[in-house]
Amino acid sequence: QVQLVESGGGLVQTGGSLRLSCAASGRTFGTYAMAWFRHAPGKEREFVATIIWSGMMTYADSVKGRFTISRDNAKNTVYLQMNSLKPEDTAVYYCAAGQPWDTTRYRNSEYNYWGQGTQVTVSS
């Protein structure tokens, strides 16, 4: 069983930055694929970014060049650095843990464990 706890959300102006953190339990954190998804009102939950055990990363087109996912296996933590934020980035952001895949995956149905979410609001 893996427990995930997100933090770092908040209110920021357009063009600002935030860094989300996701602390995970479990001694094999370094093997898990970790991902960030987001859910905006009236929309489906959507993929944002993922990083697997090898360090391979994949991003949604909407955040490429602005967001960076990283992980610190010694701290059992995954991060999402968000720069140049836009109002359309406003959503609840969720951390998710998958399996030790050899490729990155973006379907939320493939991830086994989820955090409770953290709200990110970008004002115009």
Image: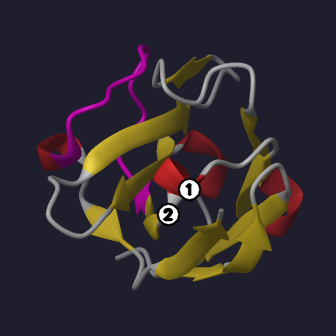
- Quadrant occupied by the N terminus: bottom left
Q: Where is residue 36 in the image (x, y as percent from the top left)?
A: 49, 51
- Please give the residue where the numbered disc 2 appears in the rendered image: 90
Q: Which residue is drawn at 42% across and 74% down?
A: 2
Q: Position of residue 92 (x, y in %)?
A: 42, 72
Q: How far apart are labels 2 and 1 at the CA level?
A: 6 Å
Name the one closer to the observer, 25 or 59. 59
Q: What element carries label 1?
A: helix
Circles 2 and 1: CB distance less than 8 Å?
yes
The correct choice, above or below, for 2 with respect to 57 in the image is below
Q: Give the range drawn in magenta.
A: 96-108
Tell me the tag on residue 18.
none
Please indicate, yes or no, whether residue 8 appears anywhere in the rendered image. Answer: no
Q: Which residue is drawn at 82% across and 49% down?
A: 15
- Please give the residue where the numbered disc 1 appears in the rendered image: 87
Q: Where is residue 59 in the image (x, y as percent from the top left)?
A: 53, 24
Residue 24, by quadrant, is: bottom right
Q: Residue at x 85, y 56 (%)?
A: 17
Question: In the drawing, does residue 121 fall left or right of residue 74?
Answer: left
Residue type (three-letter) at the residue carrying disc 1:
Pro
Residue type (three-letter) at the residue carrying disc 2:
Thr
Q: What element carries label 2?
A: loop
Please indicate, yes or no, whether residue 109 appears anywhere in the rendered image. Answer: yes
The colour scheme applied to this rendered structure is secondary structure
SS assignment for the magenta stretch, majority: loop
Q: Which residue is drawn at 21% across and 46% down?
A: 108
The correct choice, above or below, for 79 with respect to 68 in the image is below
Tally of numbered discs: 2
- Quadrant occupied by the C terminus: bottom right
Q: Position of residue 60 (x, y in %)?
A: 46, 25
Question: In the drawing, does residue 61 fall left or right of residue 116?
Answer: right
Which residue sits furthest front?
A: 124
